[in-house]
Amino acid sequence: MTLNELTPGTACTMTDLTAPGALGQRLMDLGFCPGAEIEIVRNAPLVDPVELHLDGYHVSIRHNEAKHIEVEV
Amino acid sequence: MKKMMIVLTLAALLAFTGQAFAHSPLMSCFDNGDNTVTCEGGFSDGSSAAGVKLHIKDGNGKPVLETRMNEDSEVTFDKPAGSYVVIFDAGEGHTVEVNGADIVE
Amino acid sequence: MGSKKMLVALAGQPNCGKSTVFNLLTGARQHVANYPGVTVEKKTGGFNLDGTRVELVDLPGTYSLTSYSLEERVSRDFLLGDNPAAVIDVVDGSNLKRNLYLTLQLMEMEVPTVLNLNMMDVVERRGQKIDISKLQEVLGIPVVPTKAKKGEGKEGLRAAVKQLAENRSEAVFKIEYGKMEPYIEELEEQLKEDPVLSVQYPVRWFAIKLLEGDAEAGELLKRTHPDAEKVIEQTEDCRARFQVEAGNAVERHIAFTRHGACAKIARETVTLPAVKKRSLSDRADKYVCNRFFGPIILVAILMLLYQVAIVFGNWVALQAWPIWGAIENFAAEVLPAAGFVNDPLLRALGLWVVKSTTAILNYLPIFFLLFSLISILEDSGYMPRMAFILDRLFRRFGLHGQSTLPMILGGVYVGGCAIPGVMATKAIPDERARLATIMIVPMMNCLAKVPLYLILIGAYFADVGGLAMFFIATVTLFIALPVAKILSLTVLKKQPSAPFIMEMPPYHIPTLGGILRRAGERIWLFLKKIVTVVAAVAVVVFVLINYPGLTEDRNAHYADMQSSAVVTFMKDVSKTEFKGTITQGDVLPIILFGESLKRAKQGVTDKDVSAGINQDFQAKNPTYYAVVKRVGKDGKKLNRSLKKVIKVRKKARREARSERFETSFLGTMGRALEPVTQWAGFNWRINIALLSAFAAKENSAATLGAIYGIDGDQSVQDSMKAGESGFTPLHALALMLFMALYPPCVPTSIMVRHQSNSTKWMLFSIGYQTLLGLFVASLVFTGGTVLGLNGFQAMWAFYALCVATTLVMAMIPTSEEKETAAAATNTTCKENCS
C-alpha cells in the first residue's frame, strides 16, 4: 500500500520508493528510505498536504507525492 | 438579504477606517495679525486639499464657521473670539485638529 | 608583510541555526549580494583569526548536494570552484542522523570539514546525549559543539577552523557503497586519464556523481575530458549493469547507502532518552494546524500583522513626516529663488526630485515594521504552517502555500504595498509559483491606490460608498487568481516546478538582534536599489510633464498678468511712505520673503519661539517685514495690496502649470492614446492622469486635481463631475478597475525585476498588467454601455463574472495533476502489457 492511503495517527514502515527523477531524489534526501519509520500526524485543514513524522523531524508532502511511497503497517 | 447588505457595508466601512493612511491629512495655520487666520492644507502624499471642508468650533464645541479650502489649498477666516478649534475634515476619518491657542503670529 | 587571507564556507541543512552561527562568528560585519547571475542570496562576512583575515561565505541551506536545485548547484560550484580552506558544516544536534547526510557528502567532496554540532541546548532539553569524541573518532574530522543562540561555542569553532587550515588532514570516514564499488573504480580509471579533471575535482566523488546520473557532472565532463563521449557511454553501461546486478537503480542505492551510514554513526554516538516527550512545538501544532483553529489563528496573525505594520506604521510615518517636510523646506530655501510664474529649472527640477523621493521615503517606517514582522514570522517557523494550511487552495491557481504572505502584504481586502509583497516572494521554493505570485501581487490593493478610489467613489457612487469599496477591494482577488492560473498554464509553463516536500521545523523564539538585523538589511537594499531609481525616474517624468513648455504667446499672457498685478501694487505703494523704498523689482522678493517666513514657522506652536523667528526676519529686512507682517498703518495697507498680488500669482502659476502639463510630451501621449482608450471611456485628460500616476502613484490625486483645474468652492469630486460632464458612474467604474489592475508604480517594477532577475519579466509584467487593465476597463465600459447597464449594475455583473471565472479556473487541472494522471495511465499500461 502507499502512504497516501493511510489515515492520521497511523505508524508504518517504508518499503519502497516509486517516485521518478527529482521528486524521488528529494524524498530520499529528506530521509524517505526503505526501513524508515513514518507516522502520519495530520492532514491539512483542506486535506492536502499531509504532515508526517520521521525520526525526530516533521515533513509535509502532498498526497500525490505520498502516492509514490510504498509502506507496510 | 437586506441585513446581509448592511452587515457587508458595515464590515467594509470598518475595514476601511484603517485605510488610506499614507494619504494622511496635514494642516498648518498662521495668525495674520489682522484678526484673520490662514490655514493651509494638504496630504502627506502630495495630493491637493482643494475643496476640503473646514469646521471651526468654539471652546464648547459649538460650530462657529464652516468653510472650504480654496483652489490653492488654503483658506482665510476671521479669528473667533475666545478659544477655538480648527478641524480639517477630508472625510472618512481623515481629520486634523488644530487648537486656536497653538496658532501663533 | 601582507596579512594572510582565508576563505571559509558555512554549509548546513535548513533550520539548523546556520544564520545564528554566521552572526556569532562575523558579528555585524556582513554583506549581502547575489551569486553571479542568479537570485540566490550570497551572504559574506569577515572575522579576524589570529592575524589572518577570514572571509566567511554563507552557502544556501540545502538538504543534499545534488544538481536538481539552483541552491545546491550554487553551493557545489562554490565548494569546488572557489576552493575554500575549510567548510563549517552546521548541524542540528537534535537531528544528527538526518544532518549527517549532508556532512558525508561534503566529506566526499574532499573539502576539509568541521562538524559544528549546533543547537546543543535543544539536545539537552530533549534528554539526548551525543558522544562527541566517538563521533570525532569515527568521522576523522573535528567536531565542535555550540549553542549559537546563546552565543556559546565561538572559540571552539575558531580553533577548529585554524587547526584545519594549518594541517590539511584527510578525513577518516568513507562511505562504502558495497556492490557499487567496482563500478566506481572502473570510472575512476577513465577519469584519471583527464589531466585537468583529475586535479580539479576529487576523482572518487566525480565517479560517484556520474553514476548517480548527476546532470551537472555530465556537463563538466563534456567540457574538460578529452574523450567525454566514451566516459558517458561507459557510465550508462555501468548503470545498466548495476541495475541488473543489484536490482535497484544507482541513485537509490547511493541514497539508501548514505542514509544507512548515517544511521549507523548515529546509533554509535547518540543516546536517546528512554521516554519520548511530546515537544512543545508538537503540542502547539495541534491547534495551529488544526482544521478548525488553524485558519482562525492564521487570519488572526495576518490581521495582527496588518494592524501593527500598516495602522501603527502609518501613525509612525505621520510622526516622521516633519523630517521629510523639513527636507523639502530646506530644498525650497537653498535652491535658486522662485520666479513669479516660472521658476528656474534647477529649482523646479530640484523640488520635484526631492518631493518624489520624500513621497516614497515616507513609507520607510511602514516598511521597517513590515520587514521586522516578516522576519519574526520567518524565524519563528510559522511560515511552513501557513503554507501547510493554504497550499491546497493556492495550488489550484498555480500558486504556492507560501504565496500567502506576499499577497497579504500586497493588500488583500485591506490596503498594503506591492513592494514588500514582491520582496516576500523570495521564500517561495517553486520557481513557477514564485513567478506567478510576482506577476499578480501588484494587482492587489496598495495603499496609494486608495485615494483615487475614494475620489471616484465619493463623486459617482456616494450613496453606495461602502458597497463600492467592498467591490473594488475584493474584485482584484477574483481577477488575480484566474490570471495566476492562466499564466501558469501558458507563459510560465516552461518554468521548473518543484515538489512540495517541506520540513516543518520546531517553533523557535526569534532573537531581537536577528530580527532587527534582517529588517535593516532589507531596508538598506530598498534604499540602495529603489530610491535611487525613483530619483532618476523623477527626472525623466519631470521632462515629460514640463516640456516642450509654454509657447511665447502664452508666456506673454502670463507675463501680462504679472505686470498688471505689479503695476496695481506699485500704485498703492506710491500712496504710502514706502514710495521710493519699494520698487517694482521688490515685489517678487517681498512675496518670497513672506513664504520663507511661513516655512520657518511651520509646526511652531510656542509663542516665544514664533516671536523669535519674527524678530530674526525683521532684522533681515525691516521693509519687507513691515509689508508682510502688517507693521504700521502703511504696512497694513500694503499688506492688503500684497495679498491681491499673491492671489494673481497663485492663479497664474496654477493655470500655467496646468497648460504646460496639457501640452507636454505626456499630454501628447495621452491624446494619442485616446482612440484606444475611448473604449474604456477614458478621454485624453484621464490618460494623462493615468500615465503620470504610474510614474508617481501618490501624485495621481494631485494630478487629477491639477487637470480639472479645481475651482474655488468645489471639492475635487465636484470639480471632476463638472469638468467631465458626460462622465457617468460607468466611466468611473471602468477607471477604477483600470487603476486597480495596471502597474502601480515604478518602485514595484524595479522590485519585480530584482526578484525575477530579468528585465524581460519586468517588462512583461508592466505590459500584461496594462493590457489587462485596458481590456477589463473596456469590457466593463463598452459592455455596460451596449447592455444598457448603469454603473452600479455593471459593477456587480462584472463581479459575478470574476467570481465565476475564478471558480471555473479552479476546476481546470494543474499541470502536475495532468502529469500524474498521465503517469498513472502509463503504469497501468505497463502492468497490463507485461
Image (tube, coloured by chain):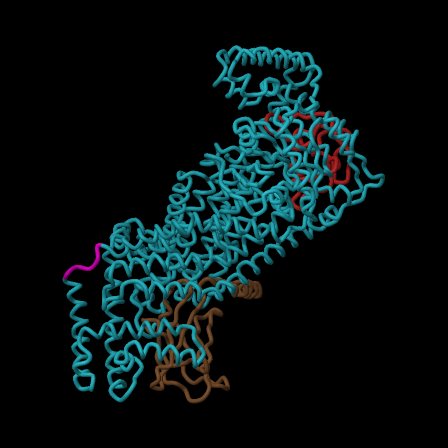
Chain colours: A red, B brown, C cyan
The residue shown at (39%, 81%) is C611
The residue shown at (30%, 84%) is C630
Q: Main secondary structure of the magenta part?
A: loop
Q: Is residue C572 above or below residue C43?
A: below
Q: Is residue B17 above or below residue B65?
A: above
Occupied quadrant, residue C634: bottom left
Occupied quadrant, residue C263: top right
Residue C252's x, y, as percent? 66, 22
Can residue A24 be spotted in the picture? no
Occupied quadrant, residue B42: bottom left
Outermost residue on the right side: it is: C274
Q: Is residue C466 left or right of B48 when viewed as pictured?
A: right
Residue C443's x, y, as percent? 46, 50
Q: Is residue A55 above or below residue B9?
A: above
Any magenta on residue C77? Answer: no
| Boundaries of the magenta span | C548-552
The one nearer the camera, C210 or C291, is C210
The one nearer the camera, C303 or C40, is C40
Outermost residue on the front side: it is: C1
Q: Is residue C215 left or right of C639 when viewed as pictured?
A: right
Can residue C313 be spotted in the picture? yes
Residue C672's x, y, as percent? 25, 50
Q: Looking at the figure, which quarter contains the C terminus of chain C?
A: top right
Marks counted in the figure total 0
The one nearer the camera, C337 or C504, is C337
Residue A5's x, y, as percent? 71, 34
Q: Is residue C550 above or below residue C767?
A: below
